[in-house]
Amino acid sequence: MKILQQAQQMQGRLQEIQDQLQQQTVTGSAGGGMVMVEADGKGQVRRVKLDPSVVSASDVEMLEDLIQVAVAEAQKKAAALAQEEMGKLTGGLPLPFKLPF
């Protein structure tokens, strides 16, 4: 019975961490800040900000590349934040599985 209670407590704490991650913000950038991407702690993109100087019909491919880099950076930061928060739950032990978010 005690193990079941511990599992329920851990599940509740996991939900709290997921809720907290959703409220946090990480930022990725590319091109020296010309493209900025803001995401929540789960890696869901909330906002993309472009410097007007990178918006050029003649170089759409460069802009697409910058956006891709900025999104990837934001998602990488979100994953690191999630891993850090989960480490608090597991007492710093590395998780043997990929997080579900």
Image (tube, grey):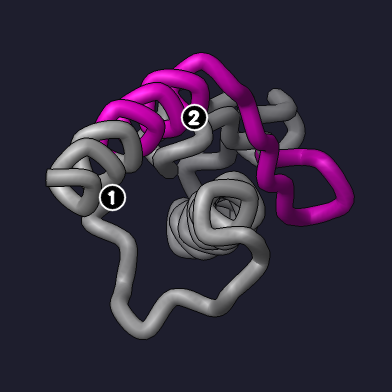
Answer yes or no: is residue 61 visible: yes
Image x and y of residue 5, in percent: 21, 37
Label of residue 101 in the image: 1
- State the residue at coordinates (47%, 59%): 68
Tell me the SS state at disc 1. Answer: loop
Label of residue 21 in the image: 2
Q: Residue furthest right?
A: 32
- Splitting the image into 4 quarters, where does residue 97 fall? bottom left
Q: Pick whichever, 56 or 27, lies toward us.
A: 27
Q: Is residue 84 left or right of residue 82?
A: right
- State the residue at coordinates (62%, 60%): 91
Q: Residues within 10 Å of mark 2 (few under 14, many from 20)?
A: many
Residue 65, placed above or below residue 60: below
**First to last magenta residue range:** 11-35
- Splitting the image into 4 quarters, where does residue 44 fall? top left
Does residue 86 show up magenta in the picture? no
Instruction: Please say if the residues under marks 1 and 2 sit with CB atoms less than 8 Å apart.
Output: yes
The amino acid marked with disc number 1 is Phe
The amino acid marked with disc number 2 is Leu
Q: Residues within 10 Å of mark 1 (few under 14, many from 20)?
A: few
